[in-house]
């Protein structure tokens, strides 16, 4: 249906019912959103929503656009429902050119995380835009402010394009005042063929851009997260969770793990610039640049058969500015369906972190041509006399080593057959503890050569 046809139909309906003068835009929009196809132009000005604008089931070939004079959807104080705009089983839908302002009155809520068998789409309300079980969805040039849940939440969809989105001051905290993951862009439950690009996300309480699937659900596949900027979150800037074939390229950000008081350390969620979770394979993290990361630079828990190339995390402020500062890169194996194998970590710059440059488990990895500078800023020596270093007394080399080869993460691992070469490693004690091994790991079962180790005070 063309725009003229839509407008004519709406005017004709008003003439027949003689109700135009009595219908406000708030009253007219829900009926407009029941169109199964065509074009919907939002009115100029601010529309107060008390319930969601729900697309008709099976809506297809539909455009939802803001007015050129400016359109705002505002969630009223008494708003009840899943999101400002909700679509189920939709296809070929484009949403663009307006703003959504939430009704977040307070940071603290009773919500924390959904049970393991419940999706985020089913658990969280008061979101911005939610699509479930849909395909060929495009969300472009939409601004979000003060959203209590997720500005964009896409669940079990395919062919998703999210471009030029601006998110500010969104997300909430759990009852204890810690991050409950909300505030950013989430793709979950086996979403495939997605592209999230050129978005700006600032001052949120949860992960900036991320994928997630419940254990046993399909992997998220074949996605790109590129050229985005994330600034100011106590959780992760980017998280790749339970996924395959994901490219995380040329993103940038700052103030990750900020404010530290909102980080979910009780839930085990150390802030990370680029995080991994679940089973993550055939993926590439390349060319991403972050500054002021209070936590970890790159977490590779569940990551295997992939590449981590030419990324940087730089902390230039005094060490006291980073109370949560951890290792630069950590390998892990929490997911029982994967093994930490065949990862290339090459050409990265990790500077100014509290412990080591790399915590390494598994086999077949290549750690080459990286710069791990100004590490071990916590001055750990392995004697457990410093409170922040008093961890794993049976592994004194763990927190003081520039590169530490371990026999375990969440599960035991055989750490052998790795190549560690041409790395530049500097920091406190790096002339003595540059490359270390934990109990049960033999350095000679790995190839270690031509690394430059420099100690500093």
Image (cartoon, helix red, strand yellow):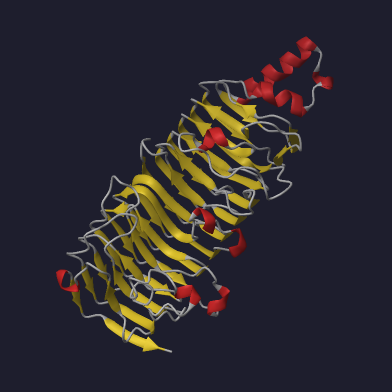
State whether residue 359 is above or below residue 114.
Answer: below
Residue toward you, 193 or 240: 240
Q: Residue at x 38, y 68 (%)?
A: 392
Outermost residue, bottom side = 457
Q: Quadrant of residue 312?
A: bottom left
> Where is residue 9 shown, x and y percent of the image?
67, 17
Q: Is residue 389 left or right of residue 50?
A: left
Q: Residue 174: image x %, image y %?
A: 62, 48
Quadrant of the rendering where the N terminus is positioned: top right
The answer, for residue 345, to whether it is visible in the render is yes
Task: State whether residue 304 is above or below residue 405.
Answer: above
* Foreground pick, 40 / 317: 317
Taking 366 as reference, is 217 above or below it? above
Q: Nearer the viewer, residue 378 or 74?
A: 378
Quarter location, residue 57: top right
Task: Give the left or right position of residue 345, taking residue 287 as reference.
Answer: left
Classify residue 77 by image quadrant. top right
Give the residue displayed 49% in from the left and 75% down from the top.
387
- Asked whether, in this view, residue 69 is left or right of residue 277, the answer is right
Give the number of marks: 0
User: Is 9 left, or right, of 207 in this rendering?
Assistant: right
Q: Is residue 332 above or below residue 149?
A: below
**The C terminus sits in image quarter:** bottom left
Name the residue: 62% across, 41% down: 97
Please provide percent x and percent y for residue 355: 42, 74
Let me know if residue 353 appears in the view.
no
Q: Residue at x 44, y 45 (%)?
A: 211
Q: Could you say where residue 78 lies in the image, as x and y percent from the top left?
A: 76, 34
Query: Which residue is farthest right?
Result: 21
């Amino acid at each position: 249906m063309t725009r003229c046809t839509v407008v004519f139909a709406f005017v004709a309906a008003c003439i027949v019912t003689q109700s135009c003068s009595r219908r406000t835009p708030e009253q007219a929009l829900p009926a407009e959103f029941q169109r199964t196809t065509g074009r919907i132009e939002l009115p100029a000005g601010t529309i107060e929503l008390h319930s969601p604008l729900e697309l008709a089931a099976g809506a297809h070939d539909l455009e939802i656009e803001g007015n050129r004079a400016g359109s705002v959807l505002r969630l009223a104080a008494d708003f009840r429902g899943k999101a400002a705009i909700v679509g189920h089983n939709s296809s070929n839908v484009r949403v663009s050119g307006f703003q959504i302002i939430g009704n977040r009155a307070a940071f603290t809520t009773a919500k924390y995380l959904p049970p393991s068998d419940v999706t985020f789409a089913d658990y969280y309300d008061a979101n911005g835009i939610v699509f479930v079980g849909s395909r060929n969805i495009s969300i472009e040039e939409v601004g979000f402010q003060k959203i209590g849940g997720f500005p964009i939440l896409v669940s079990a969809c395919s062919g998703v394009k999210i471009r030029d989105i601006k998110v500010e001051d969104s997300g909430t905290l759990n009852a204890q005042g810690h991050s409950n993951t909300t505030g950013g862009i989430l793709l979950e439950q086996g979403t495939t063929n997605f592209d999230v690009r050129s978005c700006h996300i600032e001052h949120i309480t949860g992960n900036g851009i991320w994928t997630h699937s419940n254990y046993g659900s399909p992997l998220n596949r074949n996605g790109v997260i590129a050229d985005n900027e994330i600034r100011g979150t106590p959780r992760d800037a980017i998280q790749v969770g339970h996924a395959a074939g994901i490219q995380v390229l040329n993103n940038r950000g700052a103030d990750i793990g900020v404010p530290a008081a909102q980080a979910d350390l009780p839930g085990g969620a150390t802030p990370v610039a680029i995080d991994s979770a679940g089973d993550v394979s055939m993926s590439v993290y390349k060319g991403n640049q972050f500054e002021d990361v209070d936590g970890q630079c790159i977490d590779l828990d569940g990551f295997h058969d992939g590449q981590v190339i030419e990324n940087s995390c730089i902390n230039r402020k005094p060490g006291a500015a980073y109370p949560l500062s951890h290792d630069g890169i950590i390998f892990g194996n929490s997911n029982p369906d994967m093994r930490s194998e065949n990862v290339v970590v090459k050409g990265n710059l990790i500077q100014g972190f509290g412990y080591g440059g790399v915590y390494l488990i598994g086999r077949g990895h290549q750690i080459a041509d990286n710069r791990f500078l100004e590490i071990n800023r916590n001055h750990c020596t392995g004697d457990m006399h410093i409170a922040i270093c008093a961890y794993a007394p049976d592994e004194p080399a763990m927190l003081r080593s520039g590169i530490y080869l371990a026999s375990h993460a969440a599960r035991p691992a055989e750490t052998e057959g790795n190549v560690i070469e041409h790395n530049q490693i500097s920091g406190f004690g790096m002339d003595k503890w540059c490359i270390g091994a934990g109990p049960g790991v033999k350095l000679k079962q790995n190839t270690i050569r031509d690394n430059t180790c420099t100690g500093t005070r």
